[in-house]
Image (cartoon, helix red, strand yellow):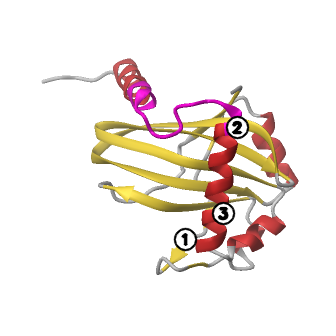
Amino acid sequence: MTHLTRRGFALSALGATAALAACGNGIGNTNASTIDARVDATLANMYSNFPNTRTLEAKSTGMLVMPLITEAGFGLGGAFGRGALRVNNATVDYYSATRASAGLQIGAQQYTHVLFFMTEDALSDFRRSPGWAAGADIEYAIPDRGETLKAETTTVLDPVIAVVFGQAGLRVGATVEGTKYTRIIP
């Protein structure tokens, strides 16, 4: 019987995340102009397919746009992607997103997500943190029937709202909980 220690699990999860990061997920280039171009394309796609996100954008103090997150797992799993933080429609920082997971899982998927920071405090906390981890306190605005996004008035009162879209792959569900965001220098 194989017994996996915490240290062994952490090393396995770190290895899975590193291997996933090495995969070509379309964001392999850390060039700032490349990331910005992908962020622009992602926002244009989101506004076109989910027009109600313009309401969130107008009320937000900033947005973290992750154009492509690649996630894979077989027992142990991980996710990786790169994106940009936009404040007043201008890129102010670049970030990577990583996540490790363990449990009953198999498959791979890719998706896009945008975090809307609805308060100055939420945005400041994110920017001051050396490695901000998304928790269960994030509110999700979910596309309804694949056509519209419901951003209710009560939802806009939450400090951070996540919009996850563009899912493709063979895994069920995509969330940002447990994802660690780290500032990078492209």
**Hey, what amino acid is under mark 2?**
Ser
Based on the picture, tell me whether residue 29 belongs to the magenta stretch: yes
Q: Position of residue 18 (x, y in %)?
A: 43, 25
Residue on which disc 2 sits: 33
Q: Residue sitting at 82 percent across and 54 percent down?
A: 89
On the image, the x and y values in percent for residue 35 come to 65, 40
What residue range appears in magenta?
18-33
Distance between mark 2 and mark 1 Cα atoms: 30 Å
Q: Is residue 106 or residue 121 the one in the foreground?
A: 106
Badge 2 local density, few (<14 within 10 Å), some, or many (20+)? few
In the image, taking residue 51 as reference, residue 7 lies left or right, namely: left
Q: Is tag 3's residue or tag 2's residue first in the polypeptide sequence?
A: 2
Could you tell me which quadrant the C terminus lies in? top right
Image coordinates of residue 164 in percent, x first then y, are 54, 60
Depth check: give the residue in front, 47 or 132: 47
Identify the image quadrant of residue 171.
bottom left
Q: Quadrant of the N terminus?
A: top left
**Label 3 environment density (alpha carbons within 10 Å; few <14, some 14–19, many ≥20):** few
